[in-house]
Amino acid sequence: MDRKYILKIDCPDKKGLIYNISNIIYKHGLNIEKNDEYVDDENAKFFFRAILSGDLNNLQLEKDLRAVLPTDANIILKAKERKKIIILATKESHCLGDLLLKYYSGELNTSVVAVVSNYDYLEELVKKFDIPFHCVPCDNFTRSEHEQKILEVLKGYKFDYMVLAKYMRILSSDFVREYEEKIINIHHSFLPAFIGANPYKQAFVRGVKIIGATAHFVNDNLDEGPIIAQDVIRVDHEFSWRDMQKAGRNVEKVVLSNALDLVLEDRVFVYNNKTVIF
């Protein structure tokens, strides 16, 4: 069976890109099983993703592609493989539990290498899945000191992405730079209207009719990173704030899982603090 590869290209747009890319792939004897492309007309930016199969010489194919693409083209070419994630959590179990169940059942195309938390509340849950659990308490430590302890744990594992499954600590700029475009977060979609403790209760008091969730990459600006996935549901006057919280948590689980699927399948381009998704 031919091995499969993912090819991702983004570069300034110009005529003939699809023809030139396809021609190079053909000359290398590769088959394009699926491809998608998009042009951002406003910024004259071209995006391309393809699933290739065949016998591939990575270095030569990339060299030949660069010969026909603009000089500042970004090219990512890698085997289609199962990626690894590490999960950070605090006390809430709904997002973590959902990911662990999907991992256990094979619905989530990834390997969960470890779970790290600043509390031990979720240790029993994690150990049911035979996954290493690390409790790194934050009490009596500065944020910098606590993050150094987290980094020491992370450096003991090889992983592709870090997932914040309701991890309730703000990450410093230094930490984020260490894993740029590799950290995925989930939160309710009331921001910036309802900030702080118990946003669902705040939303209930205001009589909101739509609640939702947002999954995004983490950057230096709190909860303002490139958005990967979102969803909403409708609520009405019959919902108590606890009903809204329960419904919101269900949306958070779905959105985080969907976002992770997109990232793990290499379907996401990050560009101008937003995403292009195929």
Image (tube, rainbow, N blue to C red):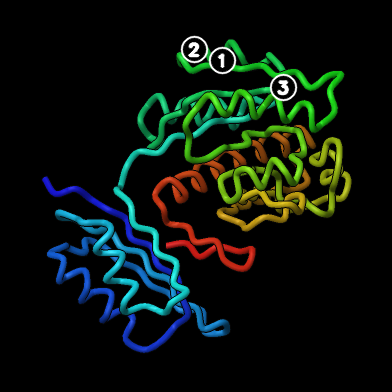
Decide: marks 3, 1 in contact (CB < 8 A)? no
Judge left or right: residue 92 versus residue 69: right
Q: Nearer the viewer, mark 3 or mark 2?
A: 3
Dividing the image into 4 quarters, which one contains the N terminus? top left
Q: Using the numbered discs, state the Cα–Cα distance from disc 3 to disc 1 in whole angstroms.
A: 15 Å
Q: Secondary structure at mark 3?
A: loop
Q: Residue at x 43, y 74 (%)?
A: 38
* Depicted 235 relative to depicted 274: above or below: above
* Depicted 56 relative to depicted 87: above or below: below
Q: Amino acid at mark 2?
A: Lys
Q: Secondary structure at mark 2?
A: loop
Q: Amino acid at mark 1?
A: Leu
Q: Which mark is residue 24?
A: none
Corner quadrant of residue 148: top right
Judge left or right: residue 100 versus residue 138: left
Judge left or right: residue 151 versus residue 160: right
Q: Using the numbered discs, state the Cα–Cα distance from disc 3 to disc 2 in whole angstroms.
A: 19 Å
Decide: marks 2, 1 in contact (CB < 8 A)? yes
Image x and y of residue 106, in percent: 35, 30
Q: Earlier in the sequence, mark 3 or mark 1?
A: 3
Residue at label 1? 125
Dividing the image into 4 quarters, which one contains the C terminus? bottom left
Q: Which mark is residue 118?
A: 3
* Depicted 261 relative to depicted 246: above or below: below
Q: Residue at x 57, y 84 (%)?
A: 42
Q: Secondary structure at mark 1?
A: helix
Corner quadrant of residue 167: top right
Judge left or right: residue 249 versus residue 158: right
Residue at label 2? 128
Q: Residue at x 47, y 31 (%)?
A: 158
